Image: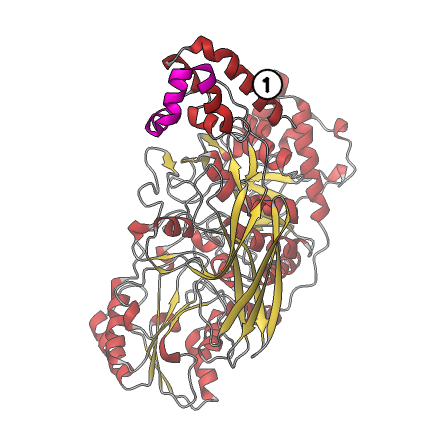
Amino acid sequence: MPDIDLSRLSLEQKAALLSGQDFWSTHALEDAGLPSVVLTDGPHGVRRQVGEFDHMGIYESLPSTCFPPAVAVGSSWDPQVAARVGAAVGQEARALGVHVVLGPGVNIKRSPLCGRNFEYYSEDPLLSGHLGAAHVRGQQEQGVGASLKHFAVNNQETDRMRVSADVDERTLREIYLPAFEHIVTEAAPATVMAAYNKVNGVHAAQNRWLLTEVLREEWGFTGAVVSDWGAVHDPVASVLAGLDLEMPGPTPEHTRRIVDAVRDGQLDESVVDTAVRRLLALADLVTERSDGFDTDAHHRLARELAAECAVLLKNDDGVLPLSSGQRIAVIGEFAASPRYQAGGSSHLRPTRLDNALDEIRALAAGRECPVEFAAGFTLDGTGDAESLREAAVRLARSSDVALVFAGLPESAESEGYDRDTLQLPAVQVDLIRAVAAAAARTVVVLSNGGIVSLEGWHDGADAILEGFLLGQAGGGAIADLLFGEVNPSGRLAETLPVRLEDNPSFVNFPGEQGHVRYGEGVMVGYRWYGATGTAVRHPFGHGLSYTTFAVGDLSVAATGDDSARASVTVTNTGDRAGKHVVQVYVATDAGPVRRPARELRAFAKVPLEPGESRRLTFDLGRRAFAHYDVQGAGWAVAPGDHRIQICENAATVVAEATVSLAGDAVAQELTLESTFGEWVTHPVVGSTLLQELAAALPDQGMQLGDRPELLQAVQDVPMKRVVGLVDGNALDETLERLMERTRVAGRP
C-alpha cells in the first residue's frame, strides 16, 4: 500500500477517489505516488479495451485467449481446471496492463432461463464455491486481483438494475451466499463486486447488512468493494453501507454529494478515510507489464481444458468414440461456424478460433475416415431450410455415422436479457429428427450457454455430447473427444429437466412489479427434484465415460459431535484411462426444518488407469451437516442420524452409511409465547411437561395426556393461550419454574 498521509489530502480529493477516473481505471494522485488501477472484464479471458469503452462487449478489444466460460468449467467438476484458467487469465492480464480482472461470477443458476447462466458455474453453492476459489487463487498468484461477482442474489437479467430479490434468510445463507463466503474466507479476492439488483428491497450497492455485517464483520473480508458498472443510486448510502469504489467514473455529482454529506454531518469523514485506505491497497497490484504471453501455448491449454468440460449425456451401444474407417457425415453450420462464447461484458476477441469441422478432418485423415459436410441450416435463418435439410439427410444416409452440430445462436442468450424457452430452434430439431431417421448412427453435439431441452429428439439420437460453450479451442477439444483422444469426464453442474414447468422457480421467475419472490426457498435445482420426486431428463452430476468405474468399501466415522470422515475406494474397471467424479452427499431427517433429499457436501475428480484403484478420504466438517437456524441466527447441527451417500449423480446412490452425531445441545429458551408443541418437544422440560400439568391440574392435565387429538389441536398454540383455556393461576408457578430451567440450559 502506498504510504500516503490522508490528512494531507483534501476532503474533495478523497471523495473523488471513491469513483473511477474513467470507464476502466481508478484515479491517480501522481504527486502522492498513487498510481491508477486498471480493471477490465473477464472472467474467462481479458477484455482489454483501448479505444471506445463499453461494458456490453460492443466495442472492439485487444486479442486474448478465450478460455472455456464458467458454464463449461462448472461441468469439469475440477478445481484444477478453474485454477489453470485463472492463472492463464492472470498472465494475459499482466501482459495487457490490467490489474484487476472482473470475475469469477458465482451466482447460482436458479432458473435455466437466466440469460447469463453461461457465466456462472452451477446450481449448487458448494461446487460453485470450490471452483470459484480455485480460479481466484490461480489468477491472484499471477499478481492480478480478482473481483468476485455479483454480490448477491443476481440470478436473472430481467429488470436486473431495479428488481428486488425477495429471499428468506435461511435460503440466503444456505443457497445464495455460501459460494461467496467460501471464496472470501479461503481465497481472499482483492475485490468483491456489488450487484445491480436489490436484496429484500435494498440495492446491493447500498445494503449495509450485505456489504458490512455479512461480508466484512462475519466473513472477515478486508479488500475493496466495487460497484457493478452503473449500480450506484445513492453514493452516500453506498459509502455508509461499505462500498469503496463506484464504477465507472468520473462522477462529479456523486463526489459533491459525498463532500456535502460529510460537511453537514450525515457522513463521518472517517468512513470516507476507511474506504480510501482499502482502495490504496489495490495500488499494490500495479506492477510492470510482462513481456507478453505465449498465444500458442495458451491455445493448446484452452483445448486441453475444454476437453475436461464436455459432458457425454448418452452413448448407446458405444457409438463413441468413432472408429477407423468410418464414413463420417458432419452436419450443422455450428461445425464450421463455432458457437464458443456468449454476448455481453465477457465477449472477447480471441487470438484464434478452431472449428470442429477442420479439426475432425485433421484427426480423421490418419484414421482413413472420409468426412463430408452439409450445413443443414443457417445461423441467420435465411436460406431454403427444406433444401438444406434434404441435402443433410442424403449425406447422412450414405454415411456410417452422422455428427449433428446443434445449439443456440449467440442472439438467444446474453447479458442483459433472459431466455423465454429451453427449446432449440425448430429448424434444428427438425434436422436432428430427420437425420436420426436416415442415418445408421447419429451423434448430436450441442453448443449452448444455458441448458436446452432434449425432448422430442433425445431418444432418436444414439449419442449426445453436451459441449456447452468451450472457448476458442473448443472445436479441437470436440474432435479429441469424438475420436477418443480424450475420454469424456464432464458432469452436469445443473439439472436437465423434462419440462421448463418442472423447474422450481417456474411460477416466480422473473417476477413482477419490481419484485421476484424466491418461493422455492432452499429447494433449488436438484434439491427440488429430489424432494418432490419429479422426473428429470438427466440429473445434476450425470455424465458418461468411455470406461467404467466401481465405487465401494465405504467407511464412515464421526470425528466429533458435528463432523465425520468418509473413505471410499474407486476403481477403473474398464480398458481405457479415465477420470471419475466421486460425489459425496449428506441426507438427514433430523432437526426442525425441512431438508432436501440429499445435498452435495464434497467431491473429487480422480484420474485412473485401467484396473487402478484409489482410496479417497473426505473430511466432512460442521457445515456439511448444518442447516441455518433463523431463530438462533447461526448454523446448527441437529442431533441424530445423518446418512453419507456416495452417488453416481444426485439421483443415484451407489453406497451409503449412517453416522450418528450429538450435534448442538443448546436448548431453546421457552417463554409463554412459545407454542405448546415447542414446550412438549423441548429436550430439557418436554418430557416432564405433561406430568407437571397433571400435577398442577389433575382433571384437565390428565385429560390432555389421555387424548392425543387434544395435544395435536393445541400444538401450534402459544402457551399463554393454552393457559387461558385452563386455570391459569394454578400454572403460573409451574411454568415459571420450567422456563427458568430452559434459561439455565441455554446459557453458554
**Local crowd at mark 1 within 10 Å, few (<14), some, or many (≥20)?**
few
User: Is residue 329 positioned above or below 525 on the image?
Assistant: below
Q: Is residue 230 visible?
A: no
Residue range highlighted in magenta: 694-716
Left or right: residue 375 compared with residue 340 = left
Look at 50% across and 32% down and name the residue there.
630
In front of the other: 58 or 264: 264
Residue type indicated by callout 1: Gln
Q: Quarter of the image for the C terminus: give it.
A: top right
Give the residue drawn at x 41%, y 50%. 525
Can you say whether 401 is above or below 567 in the image? below
Q: Is residue 154 visible?
A: yes
Q: Based on the picture, tell me whether residue 704 belongs to the magenta stretch.
A: yes
State the image coordinates of residue 277 (x, y, percent, origin top left): 70, 35
Q: Main secondary structure of the magenta part?
A: helix
Furthest residue toward top? 729
Q: Residue at x 36, y 50 (%)?
A: 113
Q: Residue at x 52, y 80 (%)?
A: 576
Disc 1: which residue: 266
Residue 322 falls in image quadrant: bottom left
